[in-house]
């Protein structure tokens, strides 16, 4: 089993510390790009909503008034750095979603699909528990390091995502690239800088920290460029940070 040198930090509900969450979104471009697309899209949700791979339930804060929240996660979610002592989350084997057919009016699934061994079965299960016409909001990374090892199985292209959902009970599949190559480069440099500041061996800090300090101005400049390019719609969409998907359940 591989051991990660830099493990992902779980996302906490924004309401716990709005300022810290805002700052993190400026630095963590993956998270910032998720928020950009997910938050406005959640205004379309209503009724009973399923959060697949709920983790710390950060997105529950943005559900419209009147929605009924239900989170589910895998039984070994502690391996992903999650708190498993939460009564509002149902833990299951990650295969058969433990609800009857057409139980939900909508679903969200954020940065989970890459950790699913059989994506076709998983997406088919989501369509089974959704009512016809229900909305699924989903994100996946594209340009991201291997994470949550050994449970990182896939990277999905736009074309693979379209085929995956159209063949497993969804239509009106709208796929958006999150970020551009500028954000991708900036994100990689942020991770590299953090690794330099926190090396595996403390004894190495005498040379890693000075290098991180040298990199810092370039990292700050690239972060600024990433936010600006995204705001004005410039940059290549062929090497994004990830993808955002909005799909409608067509299964009856």
Image (cartoon, rainbow, N blue to C red):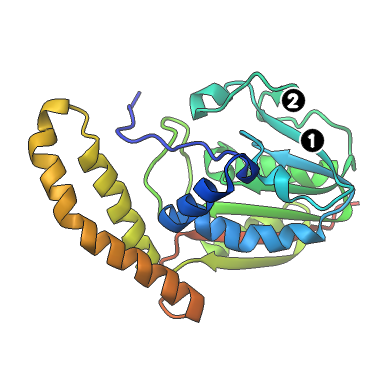
Judging by the rendered image, the residue that carries numbered circle 2 is 90
- Residue 41 is situated, as x and y percent measured from the top left of the image, at 72, 62
State the CA–CA distance, disc 2 to disc 1: 8 Å
**Disc 1 marks which residue?**
70
Give the answer, above or below, for where 208 lies relative to 164: above
The quarter of the rendered structure image containing the N terminus is top left
Q: Is residue 68 left or right of residue 5?
A: right
Mark 2 surroundings within 10 Å by alpha-carbon count, few (fewer than 14), some (14 through 19), many (20 or more): some
Q: Residue at x 8, y 36 (%)?
A: 206
Secondary element at image label 1: strand
- The location of residue 99, given as percent across then percent down, is 84, 31
Q: Nearer the viewer, residue 142 or 11?
A: 11
Q: Is residue 190 left or right of residue 104?
A: left
**Foreground pick, 90 / 69:** 69
User: Farthest residue in the top direction?
Assistant: 85
Residue that extends furthest to the left in the rendered view of this protein: 207
What is the x, y in percent for residue 242?
50, 58
Identify the residue at horizontal 64%, vertical 36% (top origin). 53
Q: Residue at x 47, y 53 (%)?
A: 23
Q: Earlier in the sequence, mark 2 or mark 1?
A: 1
Query: How many numbered marks, from 0 up?
Result: 2
Discs 2, 1 touching: Cβ within 8 Å: yes
């Amino acid at each position: 089993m591989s051991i990660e040198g830099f493990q992902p930090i779980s996302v906490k509900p924004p309401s716990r510390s709005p300022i810290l969450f805002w700052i993190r979104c400026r630095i963590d471009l993956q998270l910032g790009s998720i928020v950009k697309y997910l938050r406005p899209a959640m205004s379309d949700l209503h009724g009973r909503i399923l959060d697949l791979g709920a983790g710390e339930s950060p997105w529950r804060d943005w559900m419209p008034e009147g929605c009924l929240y239900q989170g589910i996660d895998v039984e070994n979610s502690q391996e992903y750095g999650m708190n498993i002592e939460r009564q509002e989350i149902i833990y299951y084997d990650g295969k058969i979603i433990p609800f009857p057919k057409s139980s939900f009016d909508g679903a969200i699934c954020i940065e989970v699909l890459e950790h699913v061994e059989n994506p076709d079965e998983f997406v088919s299960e989501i369509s089974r528990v959704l009512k016809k016409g229900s909305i699924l909001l989903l994100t996946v990374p594209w340009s991201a390091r291997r994470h949550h090892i050994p449970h990182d199985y896939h990277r999905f292209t736009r074309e693979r995502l379209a085929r995956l959902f159209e063949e497993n009970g969804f239509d009106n599949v709208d796929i958006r690239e999150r970020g551009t190559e500028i954000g991708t480069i900036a994100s990689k440099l942020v991770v590299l800088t953090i690794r330099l500041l926190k090396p595996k061996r403390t004894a190495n800090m005498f040379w890693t920290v000075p290098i991180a300090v040298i990199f810092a101005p370039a990292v700050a400049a690239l972060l600024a460029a990433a936010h600006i390019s995204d705001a004005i719609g410039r940059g290549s969409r062929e090497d994004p940070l990830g993808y955002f998907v909005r799909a409608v359940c067509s299964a009856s």
